[in-house]
């Protein structure tokens, strides 16, 4: 499947590039296990909320402490959270802005996969938009099977049916075979 362009989104919304932007409910997952993980999540949330195109309401899950998944041996525990907001614009542009936030917060652009990190920001979904490029897959291809994503989403949208799924977030979480230890550490952050 080809990337979704801004022109496609505008056409889908029934307008022209100069007159109409496409707004969709969008979610991002945040994770950190290096430095000051709580401070890193707070800084990422502030930077995301301040982005052009991000519209209220912005919903924040609680923060959860989780075991590192598929990381290097002896990796520290992660703090994880999810934000959901209305976004007006092209999801590919948003993804690029999220990568810039990661860089600004100290994550090297070129890094090994599944390693400890100061900040990780994953674009989970943008409405029902589907994108499949080398850089970006929407909806996120593994979010439906990751407890550290589903648990925070459950806080804000328990009855949401994720794109390409037929079960609610609550049902998906209940069917995960091996639930790890997930500890809610902060409701307000």
Image (cartoon, rainbow, N blue to C red):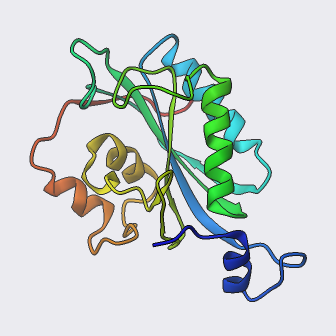
In the shown orientation, is residue 21 left or right of residue 76? right
In the shown orientation, is residue 71 left or right of residue 128? left
Q: Nearer the viewer, residue 10 or 60?
A: 10
Considering every residue shown, the one lying at the far bottom of the view is 14
**Residue at image location 52% in from the left, 12% down from the top:** 36
Q: Nearer the viewer, residue 72 or 62?
A: 72
Q: Nearer the viewer, residue 184 or 168?
A: 168
* Residue 7, placed above or below residue 52: below
The picture quadrant where one finds residue 42 is top right
Considering every residue shown, the one lying at the far left of the view is 177
**Residue at image location 32% in from the left, 19% down from the top:** 77
Q: How far across and down, in percent of the image, does residue 70 sit?
A: 24, 31
In the shown orientation, is residue 5 left or right of residue 166? right
Q: How far across and down, in percent of the image, does residue 10 sit?
A: 74, 79
* Residue 98, placed above or below residue 5: above
Q: How far across and down, in percent of the image, does residue 122 sit?
A: 49, 44
Q: Quadrant of the N terminus?
A: bottom left
* Residue 140, placed above or below residue 67: below
The picture quadrant where one finds residue 184 is top left
In the shown orientation, is residue 64 left or right of residue 120? left
**Residue at image location 66% in from the left, 52% down from the top:** 94
Q: How far across and down, in percent of the image, does residue 130 sit?
A: 48, 70
Q: Quadrant of the C terminus?
A: top right
> In this rendering, does residue 62 appear at all?
no
């Amino acid at each position: 499947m080809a990337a979704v362009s801004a022109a496609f989104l505008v056409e889908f919304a029934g307008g022209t590039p100069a007159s109409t932007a496409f707004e969709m409910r969008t979610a991002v997952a945040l994770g950190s296990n290096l430095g000051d993980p709580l401070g890193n999540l707070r800084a990422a949330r502030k930077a995301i909320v301040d982005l052009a195109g991000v519209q209220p309401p912005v919903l924040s899950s609680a923060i959860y402490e989780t075991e590192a998944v598929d990381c290097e041996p002896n990796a520290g525990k992660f703090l994880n959270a999810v934000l959901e907001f209305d976004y007006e614009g092209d999801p590919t542009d948003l993804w690029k802005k999220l990568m810039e936030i990661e860089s600004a917060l100290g994550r090297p652009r070129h890094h090994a996969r599944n390693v400890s990190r100061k900040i990780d920001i994953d674009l989970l979904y943008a409405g029902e938009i589907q994108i499949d490029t080398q850089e970006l897959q929407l909806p996120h291809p593994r979010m439906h099977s990751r407890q550290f994503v589903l648990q925070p989403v459950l806080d804000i949208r328990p009855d949401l049916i994720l794109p390409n799924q037929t079960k609610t977030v609550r049902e998906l979480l209940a069917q995960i075979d091996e639930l790890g230890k997930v500890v809610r550490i902060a409701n307000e952050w």
